[in-house]
Amino acid sequence: MLKIYNTLGRELQEFEPIELGKVSFYHCGPTVYWVQHIGNMRAMTLADLVRRSLMYMDYEVKMARNYTDVGHLTDDGDEGEDKMAKGAERENLTPQQIADKYIKLFNQDITALNTIMPEATPRATEYIQPMIDVVQVLLDKGYAYATPKAVYFDVSKFDNYTALSGQKLDQNIQDAGKAEVSDPDKKHPADFSVWFFKTGKHENAIQYWESPFESSAVENGEGFPGWHLECSVMANAELGKTIDIHMGGIEHIPVHHPNEIAQSEAANDQTFVNYWLHNEHLLVDGGKMAKSEGTSYTLEDITEKGYDPLVLRYFFMQAHYRSKQNFTWEAMDAAQTAYQRMLNRVRELYLKSGEQELAKVSAKYKAGFVEGLEDDFNVPHSLAIAWDLLKDKGIEDDAKLATILDFDRVLGLELESKTNNPQTADEVPDAAQELLKEREQARAEKDWAKSDEIRDRLLKEFSVIVKDTSDGPKTAIGG
Ligand code: AMP
Ligand code: ZN
């Protein structure tokens, strides 16, 4: 039985999907105005691990992740600049071009990390009309009011606004509205904008649409939607009015997600989300990632140093999603060694099991693996089970191979494609051929220490695995 830690209620709860065997899953996506850093990549990988775990448990998953391409201000409250406008200005491109560029880069990165593409990837600017419709419903129902500057959601009208955050409203005010509120007509500092009119500091907004909302400051209700509203509307449009699982970073607990709940439930009169999951952040060298400190690494920074992106994926799997994780280059090296070792083991299993049909998955190890996943997606535990399996001398090689490949449906380490490519001795590089000859000489002289040492060098320097068989040494190379 799958148990999930639900931020709403702050406890482990048994998972009961709305529809038997199916899961609808919404993940707050990136604001596509800049290259995403490895903290963002951690968030994407963790969501992928949740989705792959659900699939492994035989749920049919429909996942949606949005691209925020308008309306996300540099501050989660209603202050600050529009991030897209900032990006456009920085690069002298239109917001549309900025969005296209960074969506492409984002998708390259998450693909390199072997995450499965969500079934739906809505773009905020393609849902403007449904957003306007929801704002109208909120106005009609008395949950929202317009000032000359914006249409606000009135948090005092919504019971339990702080249910998710668990905060007192005063605390929310500090988080949401900051100390200064630039609109004197706003009724409560925690009220948040669902529609910004193209006026005041947004007078020169480059992305705006006409709306039926009235403001003395603009014609035809011109403006743009608030970021919080966008997620509610896209989630409802893609997955229905009540969703099984919604995931995002912990920074969304105080403002963004309570706002999503308030708008959706006020508009639809039904529960928005049954299970709220929040992932902790990635730190670098023990601190917050910061561009100014040069610690806001991107995936490109990682691959430029020669790491396979899947080493980063392996690294992310070593920490639970609700724990902070600290990135260091030493930790990357350790992950690389571990991943390489895993590949080598699997490669050996391929060598030993030859062309035989895949054997049965070990029921004992599968049970242990699933137990980890069912315990609030404890992937580090399941990864440890995968290692126990690989080290277990009591399991037949064929069964071991079948089982580890089955686990890779969740791990996503491309164990098969990276290892099932045995090559003949002729394809071994010349320098390695020399070492192989030296090793044969050492073996002939029964110098086992030297022979082992060369075998280690072949593996480390050339990724060449040597297996001694009754027909003499056999070699394989891996990626
Ligand atoms: P943004 O583009 O800023 O909206 O962020 C996109 C996603 O990355 C959000 O789900 C954030 O929660 C997540 N995120 C941002 N910084 C970090 C971090 N340091 N560690 C993990 N996730 C992060
Ligand atoms: Zn969101």
Image: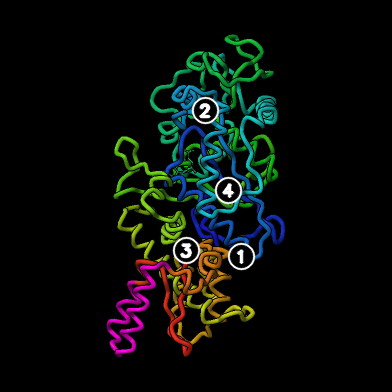
Reading the image, the residue beneath label 4 is 246
Mark whose residue sits in front, 4 or 3: 3
Q: Does the numbered disc 4 mark a residue whose Cβ is under 8 Å from ligand 2? A: yes
Q: Callout 3: helix, strand or loop? A: loop
Numbered range of the magenta stretch: 429-457
Q: Callout 4: helix, strand or loop? A: strand
Mark 1 and mark 4: Cα distance apart in space: 19 Å
Q: Callout 1: helix, strand or loop? A: helix
Reading the image, the residue beneath label 3 is 479
Q: Nearer the viewer, residue 75 or 448?
A: 448
Which amino acid type is marked by label 2? Asp
Reading the image, the residue beneath label 2 is 191
Mark 1 neighbour class, 10 Å CA radius: few under 14, some 14 to 19, many 20 or more: some
Locate residue 236 relative to residue 382 in the image: left or right: right
In which quadrant will I find the N terminus?
bottom right
Mark 3 neighbour class, 10 Å CA radius: few under 14, some 14 to 19, many 20 or more: few
Image coords of residue 274 (percent x, y) = 61, 51
